[in-house]
Image: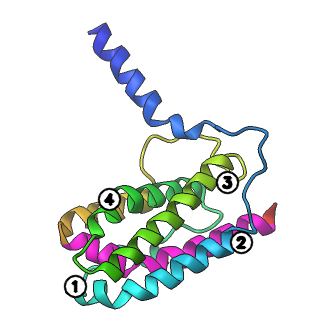
């Protein structure tokens, strides 16, 4: 029994390890690169938008609604940002590959831009007020993940067709953080 408890504690600590700053002393968030990342996301999104929206035939369900996204002063915003970056990089981008070379190139560019943003956010852990570890999913992300699973294969189409909502939220969130620091 002690072994199971020790293993469980170890797993919880490992799950929360992303909460620990990894790059202390290095310059934080690179605002010079951020607009280029967002521009790459928007440009690549416009290349894939029609393809994924045509595949997304469930108009009654939405993963990302602007009104349901966390407010920028919400204490879950940083956690939500990390969860969404991980969600797109782990669940959506790998499953969004198609037989269309042009679409795949745009999806790869989206993945690369999101990966770069994720690395930047991890490096700037304290700047984003992620100093408290919460191993529970944020309530906003919990709803997105539940809907994504309900949609099964079509969840990828929905997530890719609504990526612009996350991009807009991301842009606004980073700018609020920038202006408040």
Which residue position holds label 2? 175
Determine whether the residue tagged by mark 3 lies in a helix, strand or loop: loop
- Point 34% across, 73% down: residue: 159
Q: Is 44 rendered above or below residue 149?
A: below
Q: Quadrant of residue 101?
A: bottom left
Determine whether the residue tagged by mark 2 lies in a helix, strand or loop: helix
**Residues at badges 4 and 1 in contact (C-beta under 8 Å)?**
no
* Separation of marks 3 and 2 at Cα, in angstroms: 11 Å
Query: In the image, which residues are magenta?
Result: 154-179
Where is residue 36? Give x, y as percent: 65, 75
* Separation of marks 2 and 4 at Cα, in angstroms: 27 Å
Q: Earlier in the sequence, mark 4 or mark 1?
A: 1
Which residue position holds label 1? 55
Q: Is residue 126 magenta?
A: no
Tell me if 98 is positioned left or right of 141 in this view.
left
Q: Is residue 161 magenta?
A: yes
**Residues at badges 2 and 4 in contact (C-beta under 8 Å)?**
no
Where is residue 46? Give x, y as percent: 45, 88
Residue 62, visible in the rendered structure: no
Determine whether the residue tagged by mark 1 lies in a helix, strand or loop: helix
Tell me if 105 is positioned left or right of 80 in this view.
left
């Amino acid at each position: 029994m002690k072994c199971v408890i020790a293993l469980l504690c170890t797993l919880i600590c490992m799950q929360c390890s992303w909460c620990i700053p990894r790059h202390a002393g290095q310059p934080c968030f690179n605002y010079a690169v951020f607009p280029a990342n967002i521009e790459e996301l928007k440009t690549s999104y416009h290349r894939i938008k029609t393809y994924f929206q045509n595949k997304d035939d469930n108009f009654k369900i939405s993963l990302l609604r602007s009104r349901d996204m966390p407010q920028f002063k919400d204490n879950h915003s940083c956690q939500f940002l990390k969860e969404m970056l991980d969600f797109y990089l782990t669940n959506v981008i790998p499953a969004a590959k198609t037989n269309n070379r042009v679409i795949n190139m745009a999806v790869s560019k989206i993945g690369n831009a999101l990966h770069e943003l994720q690395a930047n956010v991890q490096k700037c852990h304290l700047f984003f007020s992620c100093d408290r570890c919460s191993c529970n999913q944020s309530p906003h992300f919990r709803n997105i993940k539940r809907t994504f699973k309900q949609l099964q294969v079509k969840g990828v189409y929905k997530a890719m067709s609504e990526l612009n909502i996350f991009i807009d939220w991301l842009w606004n969130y980073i700018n609020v953080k920038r202006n408040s620091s």
